[in-house]
Structures are given as C-alpha cells and as structure tokens.
Amino acid sequence: MLCAAFAILIAVMLASALWLGSKALFIKSELESAMTLVPVVKSDVIQDRPVDASDAVKKLTAHVSAARNAADDPLWTVASAIPGLGGNFAAVTEITRSAGDLTSLGIVPLVKALDGLQWESLVPGSPKTDLQPLRDASPTVASAAHAIRASVQRLNGIETGSLLPQVTQPLSLAKDQLSSIADALDGAADVARLAPPMLGDATPRTYLLVVQNNAESRASGGIPGALAEISFREGKMTLGAQSSASDIGVMSPPLVVEPEQRQIYSSRIGKFFQDVNLTPDFPTTAATARAMWERKTGNRVDGVISIDPVALSYILEATGPIAISNPDLLSLTNGSNLPTKLNADNVVRTLLSDAYANIEQPKNQDAYFAGVAQEIFGAINGGKGGAKSLVAGIVRATSEGRVLLWSASTQEQDVLAKYPVSGSISGSSISPAQFGIYFNDGTGAKMDYYVKRSVQLIEECEAHGYGRIRVRITSTNTAPTNAATALSSYVTGAGAFGVPAGSVQTNITAYGPVQSNIETALVAGEKTGFAANRHSSRPVGTLTIRLAPGQSQTVEFAFGKIVQHTKPVVAVTPTVQALKDVVLETKSATCAPPA
C-alpha cells in the first residue's frame, strides 16, 4: 500500500513538473510574441495608421492575456510557494502582470488617446491648428506613464540572487524594455502638458529665435546670426521683429557671468551677443541672450529657441523647395550665383558658403541670412508640407542638438531640463558617463565650413576600480590650398586676429563625467599642456589647435577616476557634417577579468 501511494506521489510530481514545464514554454512563447508587436504598434502610431495600430493592439492583448492566465494557474501559484525554486515561478508571474499592465494601462489607452489626435492640428501655423486634442490626451498619457513606472519598480524589487538563468534573462529584458517605454511615456506626458501653454494656448507667448551659423563655430553650434521674435497665440505662429547679433552691439555694462564659466570662456559671454554661446550650457546662453535682447529692444520674451541651417534643411525636406519671394532678398541675389529656390540640398551651402562669395557687405550677408529664415518660417506658417514629415524633421534636428529650447518660466524649464532639447551640461538630461567635446572658433572668420571633424571614445581597462576613457578628436582643414586668395577676406579673416588667411584656429573644450579627472592631453601623440577647470562638478580641459589648408591634427584627452559604470556617450558641437560622420563608434578595450 505504501509503495502504491509512493508511486502515485511520484507520478503526480512528474505530471506536475511536465505541466509546469509546458506552462513555462507557453508563457515564454506568448510573451515573446507580445514583445514583437510593441514596435509594430509604435510604428503604426507614428505613421498615423490607426486601424493597423488597433489590430496590432488586439493581438498584443491576446498574447499577454494568455500568458497572464497561464501564470495564474493554481498549480503555478502553488509552485511559487516552494522554498528555493518557487521564486522563479513568482518572478515569471510578476513579469506577466507587468506585461498586462503595459498593455491594459499603457498601450491600449495611449493608442485610443493618440487616435483622436490630428497631425495637422499639432503644427504651429497650420490653418487647422487645434491644441484641444493634445490637452485632452495629457491625463491619459500621464496615467499610462505612471502605471508603467510602477511596474518597473515592482520588477526592480524582485530578488534575483536565487533565480535560474532562464528567468533572470527575460526578467532583465522586461525591466529594460519597460524602463525604455516608461521613459518614452514620461516624455510624451511632459510634451502633452507643456506644449499647449508654450504654444500660447491660454496666454500668447513670444520667443527669441536665434539662428546659429555653423561656419563660425561656437560650443552649441555656431555664432548667432539672424535674430527674430516668434509669437504663438492658440498655436498659431507669427514672425515678428527681426535683427542680427551684430545689431545688438556691445553690452555696457556687461551682463554678469557666473564665475566657473567666466573662468573657462571669459566675460565675453556677457558682453557680445555673438559670444553668448561660447559656453555649451544653453540655459546660460539663452538667459543671457534674452537679457541682451530686452536691454537692446525693450521687448520682453518668454523664452529662446535656437536653430541652425542644417535643421532648416530638415524642415525643407518636409516643405519641399521654396521660391524666394521677398523683394529685398531678391535684390541681394540679383546678378549673383545664389539660387532663387531653396531646398534641402542647397540651403546649407547657400547660407554657410555661397552667400559669402556672392554678397560682399557683412550687413547684407546678415540680411540675407535673416531673409532666408523668414522665407522658411513663412512656408511653415502657410501650411506648406506634410505635418508628419515636418514634425519628424524637427525631432531629428532636436536629437542632433540643432534645435534647443529654453523657457523663462522656472516650472517649464525644470521639465525641459530633463531632456537634451534643453542643451544643459548638468542635471538629469546628462548621462552618468557623458563626455562633451565642444568647438569655439579662434579665427574670427567663417572657415569652419571647411573643417571636418570626428570624435571617438576609446575605453581602457579599469585602474584601481575606476574607469578610464580617452577621447580622440581629429580635425582636418579641407579648404583649398589657395584659400587665402580664393576665398573672401570675410571668410578667411585676412589675418585680422593673428591667424594666417586660409588657416583655421579652434579652441577645443572637453568635458568629462562628474567627479572624474582629466589626466593628460596629447596633440599629434605628444603630451601638451591644457587649461584645466571645473564646470558643475565636471572636469573641463581646453586647448587650441591651428590648421593650415589640407592639414589634419589629432587631439586626445585622457580621463581617469571615472566612477560611473554605465555606457559612455559623448555630446558634440553640431557642425555642418552629419552627426553620424562626427561621432564614431566607441572603441572598447579587451581587459582581463579582475583577480
């Protein structure tokens, strides 16, 4: 009798094990199928395919529900209580519940909310501009973000020490994916909350628009050129008073520059509008530019928007070519080789090179720069181009640091500071292991159009428990060998600031992560001195290079005492080049495991 009972017990245990094994395989299959549908839903939403998005969500929901029901099986629940092994079953149950939250509390309501949005209504200046759907979507998006964040916290609370590899791997993947989705939802919630008031929903807003000129580098892009007031009322955009940085004149007395940045970049930041962005910290630049504009014009603005010609080319990809219609602008192009139609392919070269070859007077060059910006924004205001492609172009420019935004409202700026669009060099928008390489022209001319650069992080083996990174910067002056005579004196500088015509002088500033140190600097493989400082607890090193036409130079900064063990990233000054050609793939070291 005892033997029979024991045999029955063994049979039950084997059957239970087989049952649990089949359930585990089923849950794994259903969750994997669900995860493949998440990017499908995302793509359908972005491409404005509501029917396809709805179908994908139904399939996603079915897979997640099946996995969750399997994990709620009574036998699975009993197995979760088994000492030692039970933690694996409990962890899988938590993963399925989080997947259920992602679907029911995040994706489903989010897709419904976005289904009510009309892309055309989100474009400032469009005749169909309507911010109400965005306002309506805001609570739903915020609720979805909160729900997914709570799921992430529950997964992070799971003790992984006793879990099997077959469980820890999907658990880690689930945490990473949910965290990524939560970050995206947090961003969407902030946009839905901030966009209506910043676009003049209740009260009209006016911003100072600064067009940076990459032909003369500054840390955040290029020397400020055209300036204009851009206003929003209930989402409708109008372009107001226009000027140029040179028209602002010299600030007397200069504006106060905080000590750390004054030490690195000099007091010129507070004296000349052309130098407000010698610092890579855009909040400093924007607040200074706003104060200068108000002192000069008497007009108070609610914030500052910065953009560069490459970003304008992305906008022209959406609007299509625009014909120059402004009579004053046409008069500047008469008898020249400048185009009468601007498009995504010619606008950068036109603004940063051809305009200087065809228009002699700097004042007229500034007028041409401002006029082109006015034509492009006029095209946006006239509803030219597809809304989705226009938004995509602006998002692309923002991701490359070519569009920056600052609000004079402390509450709004606190939210903006969480994202790269703020252009901050400190705070939550900065990765723990973030480096920064920034370029400031030292030629006093427009030669940076001809400079090609690359930046690469090179990981080295840890030393005494700290990380080590070298940052390699290679610069090449591609100007023609006869640049001194072939290019205009305005472009070369004609040696006015001690740099031979045709040569390019650049001040390279390198930032490391918080608490790290810059140990050495090399130029052409030789150790060299550099100016060492600190900015917001980040180490800062600066040195100067000069390149004759055709010459290349490689600079390396070696950083040590890096305590952040996260993936290193690097931010760079936006240049005429595509970002993918400037920031090269990080070179990883092959290190022996620690003893």
Image (spheres, rainbow, N blue to C red):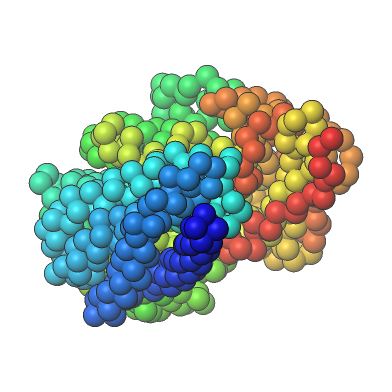
The answer to which of 353 and 419 lies nearer the viewer is 419
The residue drawn where x is 33% and y is 43% is: 150
Residue at the image point whose x is 61% and y is 63% from the top: 580
Between residue 525 and residue 86, name the one nearer to us. Answer: 86
Location of residue 510 (image quadrant):
top right
The tally of labels here is: 0
Residue 187 coordinates in the image, percent (x, y): 34, 50
Is residue 314 at least partly visible in the picture? no
Q: Quarter of the image holding residue 62?
A: bottom left
Seen at 80% across and 55% down, the residue is 552
**Residue 375 position in % (x across, y down):** 32, 67
* Image vertical order of residue 418 relative to residue 92, above or below: above
Residue at the image point whose x is 80% and y is 61% from the top: 550
Query: Relative to 354, is 562 on the left or the right?
Result: right
Q: In the drawing, does residue 315 fall left or right of residue 112?
A: right
Quarter of the image with the C terminus is: top right
x then y, percent, for residue 164: 59, 51
Residue 102's image quarter? bottom left
Q: Nearer the viewer, residue 191 or 485?
A: 191
**Quick check: 169 above or below 351?**
above
Q: Residue furthest top?
A: 259
Residue farthest along the right direction in this orientation: 526
Left or right side of 427 for 294 = left
Residue 218: percent from left, percent from top: 55, 45
Q: Is residue 103 visible?
A: yes
